[in-house]
Amino acid sequence: MCGRFALESDAMFLQRLLDLRGGGVNLDMDPKTRYNIAPSQLIAAVGSGRAFMARWGLIPRWAADARIGRRMFNARAETLFDKPSFRESARRRRCIVPMTGYYEWSETPGGKQPYFIRRADRQTAAAAGIWDEWQGKESCAVVTTEANAAVQRLHHRMPVLLEEEHWELWLNDSVEEPSLLRPLLKPSGADLEAYPVSRRVNSPVNDARECMEPAGESDQGELF
DNA sequence: CCAGACGTTGTT
DNA sequence: GTCTGG
DNA sequence: CCAGACGTTGTT
DNA sequence: GTCTGG
């Protein structure tokens, strides 16, 4: 799944996503580095030809109550185009959520051990997202799929990390046909690495760089 | 037809 | 157990 | 996702 | 808004 992630400031990455449309749109924001991004917080996204900040946890436009978004921070790829809460956004309001890497927790005898998962080439990853607008504010969800071999031991689900050659299609709002989009929602083919990090990641309040650096022995619980 | 839900995860 | 805040 | 709280009344 | 259950 994907319930916590990190993003190091990467304006070039965001500008590349904007440039896919060829519209000469210039990035007008610079999301600052954050190492411990949790659901309900504002996260950077690019979609519909612009970059914007959206609350992480999709609130469908028809919602009577914003609280519905609380647990809508992930959306299963397998049913994305079927579920009433996601269907319309999946067809018409897709986005890319930049992330340096995301966290998974492994239960150990000594407590929960967080791991950081990132591209082995250390490039910013492009997570597939969908967004909506409710009472004038954007919110979004990260699409999940089966875990690939690299991360399966940690979890059976992972965020969809889009291949670069698929970015344009995913962000093309004129494409609404699920059969054209579903093939993009596969477990990541990119090389990923996973390593234990400081247990202080467990506190969403800790937003220090240590969150994505390999943990020292003292910060690791007993592993497995 | 109307009323009520609309989700994921993990765990049992 | 379940909800809220981050 | 995890951590931490979870309640009311009346009085200061 | 759209789907499901009755």
Image (cartoon, coloured by chain):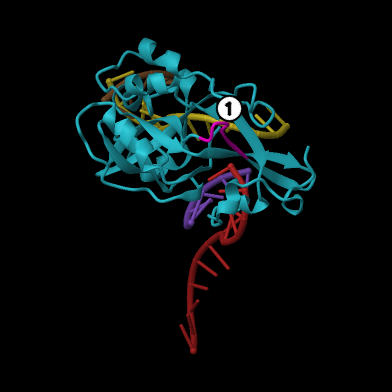
Chain colours: A cyan, B yellow, C purple, D red, E brown
Q: Position of residue B12 (x, y in %)?
A: 73, 32
In the image, residue A78 sits, relative to residue A35, either above or below, namely above
Q: Residue at x 47, y 22 (%)?
A: A77
Residue under label 1, please give it. A157
Q: Chain of mark 1?
A: A
Per the image, is A141 magenta?
no
Q: Quadrant of the C terminus of chain A?
A: top right
Kindly tell me whether residue A19 is visible in this rendering.
yes
Q: Position of residue A104 (x, y in %)?
A: 62, 38
Q: Nearer the viewer, residue A224 or A169?
A: A169
Stretch of the chain drawn in magenta? A116-122
**SS type, badge 1:** strand
Per the image, is A120 magenta?
yes
Q: Residue at x 72, y 40 (%)?
A: A107
Kindly tell me whether residue A59 is visible in this rendering.
no
Of the residues shown, which amino acid type is indicated by label 1?
Arg
Q: Quadrant of the N terminus of chain A?
A: top right
Badge 1 crowding class, 10 Å Cα cut-off, few under 14, some 14 to 19, many 20 or more, is some
Q: Position of residue A160 (x, y in %)?
A: 49, 26
Q: Residue at x 59, y 49 (%)?
A: A211
